[in-house]
Image: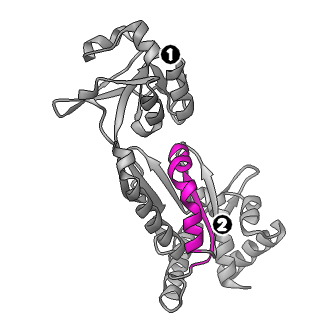
Amino acid sequence: MDKFQAMQVFIAVVEQSSFTRAAEQLQMPRASVTLSIKQLETHLGTRLLQRTTRQVNTTADGDAYYQRCVRLLADLEETESAFSHSLLNPRGKLRINLQGSLGKTFVVPALPGFSARYPLIELEVGMSDRLVDLVREGVDCVLRGGELRDSSMIAKRVALMTQITCASSAYLQKHGVPKALDDLPAHLAVNYFSSQTGRNMDFEFVVDGKTQTLPLKGQLAVNDVDAYVAGAEAGYGLIQLPRFHVAAQLAAGSVQEVLSEMRPPPMPVSILYPHHRQLSPRVRVFVEWLTELMETHADKLKA
């Protein structure tokens, strides 16, 4: 039994919660994955996994062994990088997940520069605004906007995005331009609801240095940024979002900012990755490159 490979297989099964998905990720036959786990359990003299028809979970011993395997493999990769050129020319597959609008606008157009710098790294890019379970889904790192609540991940803030309140010029001509928070109950909004909770996000306004939240009524609620902007352009009401999303519409005059003296708090942009992947040369160079990239776009994000 190849212990190193068996540990890699075991980690993949745990993180994917599935023998089949682990086999696909490792590009191995499912039977080989099953055999590897059986041999590993026999070698260790304990059961590592509990299998059901729907999911694979770790036993108490399996969870402890998983944590040690992750640390050992991370230490091994770090050790190898210290005695090789892997930091200068890392290789292998890097799985990243980008928040849709940030990815499409800033990251993907610049990726050829990353690939030219690191030609041996194969990129697998997912686009999503939902929360991603990095460990279970085998993702190496994600780029997200918004306040972060997952303390189990390493988070690196790389930018702040100016946010505004705005609406279509046609809507404001019909309903009037709000001049104060007291005017807002008479207005409609395109509401943005959370994919996780299904709840609408409150509007936020900074008044005298303090953030005030306010729910607004509306006829339309969405959970996609493009649909959010489209709803505003269609005249459904006010929206709040990072300014870069509507920079073109603002320049064209089809959308207008309102209540500019009480803008929402800036939205942070952060890179997240699991603790056990912080030593990976692939993750390290991508985080450094992405940090540099977001710094070059700081003016656009803050404008």
- Identify the residue shown where x is 26% and y is 17%: 181
> Is residue 105 highlighted in magenta?
yes
Quadrant (top left/top right/bottom left/bottom right) for the N terminus? bottom right
> Which residue is at the far bottom?
83
Label 2 is placed on what type of residue?
Ala
Magenta-colored span: 90-118
- Crowd class of label 2 (few under 14; some 14 to 19; many from 20; radius 10 Å): many
Label 1 is placed on what type of residue?
Tyr
Q: Give the CA separation, mark 2 to mark 1.
A: 46 Å
Q: Which mark is residue 236?
A: 1
Q: Quadrant of residue 57?
A: bottom right
- Identify the residue shown where x is 55% and y is 26%: 230
| Viewer-side residue, 114 vs 138 | 114
- Identify the residue shown where x is 49% and y is 72%: 285
- Crowd class of label 1 (few under 14; some 14 to 19; many from 20; radius 10 Å): many
x and y percent of residue 74 in the render?
52, 77
User: Left or right: 225 with respect to 151?
Assistant: right
User: Left or right: 43 with respect to 152?
Assistant: right
> Is residue 213 highlighted in magenta?
no
Q: Which residue is mark 2?
A: 12
| Viewer-side residue, 183 vs 154 | 183
